[in-house]
Image (spheres, grey):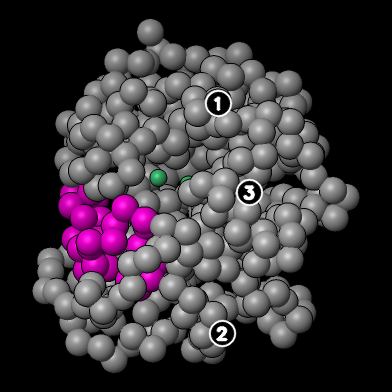
Amino acid sequence: MPWFSFHGGHSSEFCRHAGGRLEEIVQKAYEAGFTSLGVSEHAPRFRQGDLYHDEQDLTPGDLLTMFEAYRVRARELQKEYAGRMEMFVGFESEMMPPPEVGPEANKPAPHSHAGLSAAAEVSPEAAPPAGEMPTTNMALKRDARFFEPPLNDGMAVSARSGGGADRPKATAVVGNWAGRMKELKAKGKFDYVVGSVHSVGDYWIDYSPQATAEAAEALGGVEALRGAYFRQVVEMIEDLRPAIVGHLDLIRKFDGQHPEFSKGTWLEIDRALQAAHAYGCVLDVNAAPARRGLGPIYPMKEILRKACAMGVRVTLGDDSHGPADVGVGLDQAVKMIGEAGYRCINYLARWEGSVVWEEAPIETVYPAK
Ligand SMILES: [Zn+2]
Ligand SMILES: [Zn+2]
């Protein structure tokens, strides 16, 4: 009888491209028979050029303030629902370098703010005033300064074989973004992180078909883009080691109902699954495409079959961006997990003060009422 989602809960209060209030989402989840709910608002980004297309009037300092307000509100709701529905408060990562990487580092602070104090010490100060940044084409392309060399703090190269020299430019320059995400998690005492990749190089790959096509062109074709994306997923997993890997094959968002990958891309996918397995990450079986009519649930069944054979565990995510999305498509996600060969689905639980994974036989995973 567990029924749950651990990726979603984006609300208009704390995310410009979502709808509704967080309390409405939580209430909807309770009414829909959720026994557990994890909310995972987008992590703030630290450089002006990394803001989403609908955040161009904001600053990185504003995002930090919103993120802190999200944390506080989510914990309030967790207390409110205690005993009825177990809530977990997390966030969804980005692979964006912190401001120290770019030339903005020594610019004066545009804003004073309240927020996560340690993160705030460095971040907003490093952002330029909003008016200084160009706003044209921001929707499609992030600030090209992403490609400037990072500080070599050792974090970005971690245990990857081969180091950075022979890797594509788009994935070689990430600075210590993972350190910043870990810092956010620790300072905010978040329960978990959903590790996601939404961009390749300086292009968002989940924003529009046009933006993804531009990214492919810039990288030398669709094949190159897919390869770069999955390598970035591997890098994210190795550097961040998130509890959950979000929408593993997001790169095929605009590829329709029957996406097909080449042999080369499948090798990259295998590497991503191996990394998830090696670090004990659980895959987010993400129902958003079902809701949006954008092709199979992430990861698509062929990937899930491989994941199952490799022993990579799975959980559920509705990726809700408003109350109307809550729980939508989770039944299809459960069905697909079963068809891929799984017997169990994992869900977060609390045990002796820690957040742990538990597993439920598939036939027991359905709404509580
Ligand atoms: Zn979102
Ligand atoms: Zn996402």
| Mark found first going from the N terminus, 3 or 1 | 3
**Of residues 91 and 250, which is closer to you in this image?**
250
The picture places residue 342, in percent across and down from the top left corner, at: 71, 27
Give the SS element for disc 3. helix
Mark 3 → mark 2, Cα distance in angstroms:
28 Å
| Residue 50 horizontal side relative to residue 313, left or right | left
Q: Provide the residue span drawn in magenta.
A: 47-72
Asked whether the viewer can see residue 91, the reply is: yes
The picture places residue 176, in percent across and down from the top left corner, at: 48, 77
Dominant SS of magenta comes to helix
Q: Quadrant of residue 128?
A: bottom left
Amino acid under label 1? Gly
Give the SS element for disc 1. loop
Check the picture and name the quadrant holding the C terminus: top left
Asked whether the viewer can see residue 78, the reply is: no
Q: Quadrant of residue 147?
A: bottom right
Vertical comparison of 71 with 186: above or below = above
Q: Quadrant of residue 222?
A: bottom right
Is residue 349 found inside the magenta-colored segment of the image?
no
Vertical comparison of 155 with 296: above or below = below
Mark 3 → mark 1, Cα distance in angstroms:
16 Å
The picture places residue 203, in percent across and down from the top left corner, at: 53, 62
| Mark found first going from the N terminus, 1 or 2 | 2
Asked whether the beta carbons under mark 3 and mark 1 sit within 8 Å of each other, the answer is no
| Residue 263 horizontal side relative to residue 13, left or right | right
> Residue tagged by mark 1?
293
| Mark found first going from the N terminus, 3 or 2 | 2
> Residue tagged by mark 2?
154
